[in-house]
Image (spheres, rainbow, N blue to C red):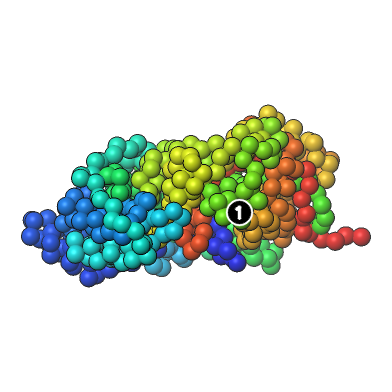
Amino acid sequence: MSLPLHRRSFLQSAAAGSAVLTVPGVLAGCVDAQRRGVPTSPATAVTATPPANPFDAWYGIDETAVRRAMTALASRGADHADIYFQHSRSNSVSYQDGIIARAYSNVTQGVGMRVVIGERVGYAYTEELTPEALERTAKSAALFAQGSPVAPPESFAAVGRPDRYALEVPWSEVGVDQKLPLIEKVATMAAASDPAVEKVSVHWSDGEERILVATLDGKLVSDARPMTRLRISLTAKKNGQTQSGGSNLAARDGIGFYTDERLRTVVEEARERTMVLFDARRPRAGELPVVLAAGASGILLHEAIGHGMEADFNRKNTSIYSEMIGKKIAPDFVTIVDDGTLDKERGALNVDDEGNEAQRTVLVDRGVLVSYLHDGISARHYGVEPTGSGRRESYRHAPLPRMRATYMENGPHTREEIIASVKNGIIAETFTNGQVQIGAGDYTFYIKNGWLIEDGKVTAPIKDTNIIGNGPETLRAVTMAANDSKLDTGGWTCGKDGQGVPVSQGLPTVLVSKMNVGGENRA
């Protein structure tokens, strides 16, 4: 289900990235390519399956052009410099009321240039992929520097990388004739899932992105990144009430991801999340124990805790965790991980957007904060290695330390034990709107689906409920964690400093001893 943005770019379910077709760049590239006997028209460059290195094959950006741009980029001094090429295509279909309401394809292409001196950054980008444009852009990025020229590498060496999301059939070879039957199938299943369902909306997206990163120390790193997402939304009417809900799937995978079992599951989740609201009521307001359900409750971990562990906030002393490395911040059974190595997961990466291999990074080890998430700048500041967490939305942006797939590992309890231990409380199952103050970790989240716990038993669904708290305090107030940790399969996109990147998140069933719960004030 989609989550509206609030005072900060709140975590939302959204298709990966925005995209713009820059016609002059495509035309220029195709003219160069035509001379070499490859794509001969803008349409071909937009629709053809990308080669391993489209920047060379289509636009003539060979190693000589990259070295010349790097020379200009480091011409006024640099501690680090990099050139980030991007070519991505996405397709989207919206299906409503039995018809295709909207369908479109987008192309994004360009190159970003970065010079780093200490913690200062000069950045410039262009959508024009020609050797001449690269040099002009590099000189613009270098303008802020005042030092002596740094020699570029004699040559660039291609660096190997893992292969966590290779596709047998790339999305560029999957036609609309293969996608529409799946979209129509899931829409038909959803419409027939309950007599009360009045409206069904299905949104489909797929895409592929090619990147190439060249660095001042001579590395040349490439990656090919697929993505797909299916979102279903239902509106139902019953006894004069109208309720809505939904569910979604996302992965760095191909069309084979959409098995019959997955389609049935996403329809059933959407139906359950919608229909249960007709019987839901508001819980009693006040300070209550809250059980965070396994999976989607990872949004709380991501937003209220994970952002505070991104190294830039700590380097600038704006995070509550700035002086807490090596200190106890949670119970012994709590281990929190941010992992870029999970095959075909939405938040997975082979390499980050600085060309560093993605890693599995333990942030909290048995209750102790042991690491932040580092990009190159913060790693140099702290004297550690990057964690493969330097990410950017597109070539228009410099990279920042960002999460990938953030989750808490299994605890020693069971879900049944946790629920039985609660006399009066609630289960928070799925979330929608929220606000978070990253530095302090204060948050408010609205619970879309949840349940009442009375005398150790789940008794009734709840609605119109919010929880209010502080991330670090909530972490300390975790008293039980189950052995059922799982990642949510939804299409989450994390917003930070105006940039959105795809992420995953998860949690086991967790008991927080007390939270402020907004509900009814009863006498």
Percent across and percent down for residue 174 are 28, 51
Q: Residue furthest front?
A: 148
Q: Secondary structure at mark 1?
A: loop
Q: Residues within 10 Å of mark 1 (few under 14, many from 20)?
A: few
Q: Quadrant of the C terminus?
A: bottom right
Percent across and percent down for residue 217 are 30, 45
Percent across and percent down for residue 434 are 63, 60
Q: Residue furthest bottom?
A: 24
Q: Residue furthest top?
A: 412
Q: Exactly how many numbered labels are in the figure?
A: 1
Q: Is residue 104 above or below residue 77?
A: below
Q: Is residue 450 above or below residue 165?
A: below
Residue sitting at 8 percent across and 56 percent down? Answer: 36
Q: Is residue 159 above or below residue 266?
A: above
Going by the image, does 267 lie left or right of 259? right
Q: Is residue 172 visible?
A: no
Image quarter for residue 260? Answer: top left
Going by the image, does 71 lie left or right of 390? left
Residue sitting at 32 percent across and 62 percent down? Answer: 142
Residue sitting at 37 percent across and 65 percent down? Answer: 144
What amino acid type is highlighted by mark number 1? Asn
Image quarter for residue 409? Answer: top right
Q: Which residue is mark 1?
A: 317
Q: Is residue 398 visible?
A: yes
Residue sitting at 24 percent across and 46 percent down? Answer: 153
Is 191 or 70 nearer to us in this picture? 70
Is 203 or 497 nearer to us in this picture? 497
Q: Quadrant of the N terminus?
A: bottom right
Percent across and percent down for residue 339 are 49, 40
